[in-house]
Image (cartoon, grey):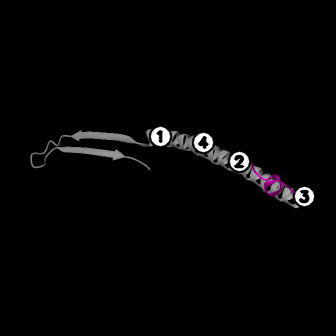
Amino acid sequence: MYNEQQYYWKWTEEERRSYRSMWVSSEQTFNNVRFVVGALLLNRLVSAINAVRLVAAYNKRAETEMGWNVSVGINNQVNYPSNLTFNFQAYF
C-alpha cells in the first residue's frame, strides 16, 4: 500500500491551470494539423484535375496542328532521279 500522505494526488490551482493550458494547446495543435493535411490533400486533388485538363487541351490542339504530307513526283527527264518528299509538321 502506498502511504497516502506521501503519494497523495494533490493539485494546486497553479498546476491545474498549467495542465489545462497544455491540454488546450495540444488540442489546438491537433486541429491545426488536421486542417493542414486537409489543405494538402485538396491542393493535390486540384492540381491533378488541372493537369488532366491541361493535357486534354494540349492533345486537342496537337491533333489540329500536326499533319503529314507525302508526295511522290516522277521526273520525265532522263538525267534526274525521281523525287520522294516527306514533310512532318508539329507545333509544340
| Most foreground residue, 35 or 82 | 35
User: Tag 1: residue type?
Assistant: Asn
Within 10 Å of the Cα at label 4, are there few (<14), some (14-19), or many (20+) other Cα atoms?
few
In front of the other: label 2 or label 3?
3
Which residue lies under the disc numbered 3? 13
Which residue lies under the disc numbered 2? 35
The first of marks 4 and 2 along the sequence is 2
Do tag 1 and tag 3 residues touch (Cβ < 8 Å)?
A: no
Question: What is the distance, in whole Å, between disc 1 and disc 3 at their CAs?
Answer: 69 Å
Q: Residue 13: x and y, percent? A: 90, 58
User: Tag 3: residue type?
Assistant: Glu
Which residue lies under the disc numbered 1? 59
In front of the other: label 3 or label 4?
3
Query: Quarter of the image holding residue 88?
Result: top left
User: Tag 2: residue type?
Assistant: Phe
User: Tag 4: residue type?
Assistant: Leu
Look at the numbered disc 3 and give the secondary structure of its residue.
helix
